[in-house]
Image: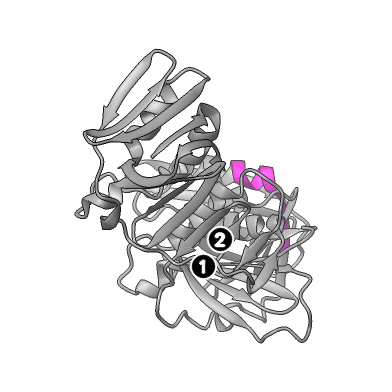
Amino acid sequence: MELVVRKADLLRELQLFQGIVERKNTIPILANVLIEGDGDHVRLLATDLEVGLRSRCQASVAKGGSLTLPAKKLYEIIKALPETDVRIEEDKSGVKVAADRFDSRMQTLPREDFPTLPEASTSPTATLPRAGVKEMVSKTQFAITGEDTRYFLNGGLFVLRPESMSLVATDGHRLALVTVTRDGKPDDAEEVKAILPKKTLGELARLLQEGDEDIRYERGEVGGRLLISRMIDGQFPAYERVIPKGNDKHIEFERDRLTNAVKRVALLSNERSRAVKFQIDTGKVDVTSSSPDLGEAKETLPVDYDGASMQICFNAQYVLDFLAAVSTDVVSLELKDEVSQAVMKPVGAEGYDYTYVIMPMRV
């Protein structure tokens, strides 16, 4: 194989593979990126057997073919090169990567060892609005548990309906649900569900940072890039039952003010539980914390509330995760009592419906 490609074009694509390729791998070939040259473009593919990414960029291919190179090291070399054309050429003793006055030879692994991944079909299941998918991922992925023996919680549940789509994530202590409308046909196929791994959603978020075209979903295609994901096989919890319907106490906060208050007060919270207490009274909410080792803190927020007094305790980080994910100036907190789950929502959000359920703490 022999080809010439612009440094900027190749670097842009290689950068997207860095989160997928694992440095420490029991299967050596998975540390490599598969490079296929054909006609006027080069195709790249990497996978960790859970998530795979296929992409392409313009190139001048003198001699077609395919080979594999270490993804991290190739990225480091291309990044260090000046803005010029890069030559990649295979011969009997390895693969030559050269540019300007720089010359290198890299070790390769057999193309035959690289896993086979599914190709995209010509007819995707659905077209998804890019902005909507971006909202869904950014507002739920932080609520996915990292290491849970309940493996079905290690991903987010994607629900595709004819006229809307939802993404739900929970770690058992809080639940984030975003629903976005889409222009599907009412007579489309019925509801489609898939649990997508945390890593898949992370890579999808990175891919959505550039471009503006909609996403074709079959198992998710992003522009000229194809994200291939293993689905988590399992039964996601019945999340609809977790969302409380009878929370009759409604309080609205300025988002920035609440964020700053919780951040400051949490500095003196118990370092293990991260608990902050909301003492709710007519016209005000006192955000407080106390720790036998560190001391105590309190900040008062004026609010429009004239219901019964009550207090409720939350993990400060869970509250801050929600406040960082929303962009509206005002957020609401809906409560029933001290032991029932609370609901937080952005007030006046456009284009999506966001529900954040948070379990109170007993301290």
Query: Where is residue 273 shown, x and y percent of the image?
Result: 38, 56
Name the residue that disc number 2 marks: 140
| Residue 353 drawn in magenta | no
Residue 38 higher or lower than 340, as above or below:
above
| Residue 255 drawn in magenta | yes
Residue at 42%, 57% (x, y): give it.
52
* Quadrant of res 114: bottom left
Query: Where is residue 94 shown, x and y percent of the image?
Result: 25, 35
Toward the viewer: 280 or 72? 72
Q: Residues within 10 Å of mark 1 (few under 14, many from 20)?
A: many
| Horizontal side, residue 2 vs residue 344: left or right | left
Task: Tell me the chief SS of the magenta region.
Answer: helix
Mark 1: secondary structure: strand
The answer to which of marks 2 and 1 sits earlier in the sequence is 2
Name the residue that disc number 1 marks: 169
Amino acid type, mark 2: Thr
Residue 260 higher or lower than 218, as above or below:
above
* Quadrant of res 279: bottom right
Toward the viewer: 231 or 65? 65
Q: Residues within 10 Å of mark 2 (few under 14, many from 20)?
A: many
Quarter of the image containing the C terminus?
bottom left
Q: What span is in magenta?
A: 251-260
Quarter of the image containing the N terminus?
top left
Cβ–Cβ under 8 Å for marks 2 and 1? yes
Residue 291 higher or lower than 304, as above or below:
above
